[in-house]
Amino acid sequence: MSVQIPRGTQDILPGKVEYWQFVEQKAREICRAFNYQEIRTPMFEHTELFQRGVGETTDIVQKEMYTFQDRGERSLTLRPEGTAAVGRSYVTHKMFGSPTQPTKLFYIGPMFRYERPQAGRFRQFVQFGIEALGVNDPSIDAEVLALLMTFYQSLGLKKIKLVVNSLGDTESRQAHREALVNHFSPRIEEFCSDCQNRLYKNPLRILDCKKDRDHELMATSPSILEYLNDYSKEYFETVQQYLTDLNIEYVVDPTLVRGLDYYNHTAFELMSEAEGFGAITTLCGGGRYNGLIQEIGGPETPGIGFALSIERLLAALEAEGVELPVETGVDCYVVTLGDAAKAKSVSIVNTLRQAGFVAEKDYQDKKVKGQFKAADRLQAKYVVVLGDDELAKNIVNVKNMSLGTQEEVALDQLVAYLQKQS
Ligand code: HAM
């Protein structure tokens, strides 16, 4: 039996990979405009980083991490997300010491979670994420959301909904936490064992439980927005004012809590509202995490960011019927007839490629008809025809495949001729 691909992973083959390249390129361009710089961190980190950063009581840490011991008996984990890793790097390289703050970073790379695979949920998936560290100001929260919306809209997505909430500061969360404990504790035995464990450790996590989602106490649970202190309330109102100034449409959902522990103040998710998108509609998630850097051993540093997976983004584009303008064809295909012409085609394609054209030739001794068929299959814009007779006269025939016209061109003028056409 042949070896199978691991569950929850996928090969991205030519024909599809161009879409990945296109959206990744778009992400890079938009990050450049917003002045976010790329960071690349290792695929694995010390397990402790995610336990402390993402949170012991989260599903990610409790159930979904790919954790292993290396030969030196260290516990390592394939990164399930990028924020804790970027935070670790920020501390390792003392980026907090840089005079220009915030430190604005982005990343594109694979993440790993041992989840139950289904449409839109993979065990290896690629996240594009940004993190702005070092500044606590509502304008940065709005900027992060503006970058996010610019990215989706530039790709042509329309059926999307931005949902925002505030989880407040430590004081507000403490008050909310007590209210949650009081709300759930009388009937906690009706909840799953995970929730029972979470009640005193981290009751906010109960609101994110997939098993107990439909319990009647969920719908009536105390809303964080009622427990925001003045500072948190004002912070959230200012963020919303900026969003309005930037013409960013959003809805406030006080039940949005996110699945990771490091959030406070602004939290948000972006949903697809495209018909037939499937059960999992969250395209992107993010928020502010003012305690994370300290939690992982750095100085007190505020931060905010988001991450989205390319897999879900491409699925949303497909569900909305958006065609990305990717190019897969070649500019010129060199068709030869005769041995001398065949030998010469090696240097002709090379010259064309050096000049920046996507050029291809036959490698299988195909007949002229077969070579034309191959040119068609590759959607060649031009076919350069060279026989031994033409070669003797140092000329080629260039056929424009969309117009069906043909012109004789001196071999040493081929590049100049094609440059003039494009
Ligand atoms: P998250 O909500 O766990 O947040 O993941 C963010 C996004 O990653 C999701 O909205 C989804 O697009 C994608 N994603 C997550 N799991 C999967 C999966 N199994 N298959 C496919 N896509 C998936 C974070 O990861 C935070 N680090 C986001 C953040 C950045 N917060 C602040 N900065």
Image: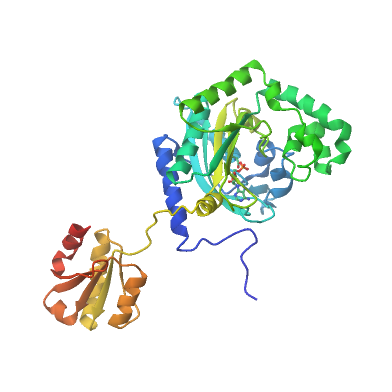
Residue 223, located in which quarter of the rendered image? top right
The answer to which of 84 and 75 lies nearer the viewer is: 84
* Left or right: 316, with 354 as reference point: right
Q: How is the image coloured?
A: rainbow
Residue 33, located in which quarter of the rendered image? top left
Ligand 1 positioned in quadrant: top right
Residue 389 position (above or below residue 73): below
Name of the residue lying farthest toward the top: 230
Residue 150 position (above or below residue 110): above
User: Dividing the image into 4 quarters, which one contains the N terminus?
Assistant: bottom right
Residue 142 position (above or below residue 39): above
Q: How many marks?
A: 0
Q: Residue at x 70, y 26 (%)?
A: 224
Name of the residue lying farthest toward the front: 275
Residue 50 shows in the view: yes
The answer to which of 108 and 16 lies nearer the viewer is: 16
| Residue 365, horizontal then vertical, whole percent | 32, 82
Residue 289 shows in the view: no
* Left or right: 119, with 183 as reference point: left
The answer to which of 59 and 154 lies nearer the viewer is: 154
User: Dividing the image into 4 quarters, which one contains the C terminus?
Assistant: bottom left
| Residue 128, horizontal then vertical, whole percent | 52, 45
| Residue 227, horizontal then vertical, whole percent | 71, 22
Q: Residue at x 23, y 83 (%)?
A: 339
Q: Residue at x 77, y 31 (%)?
A: 221
* Left or right: 205, with 347 as reference point: right
| Residue 338, horizontal then vertical, whole percent | 23, 83
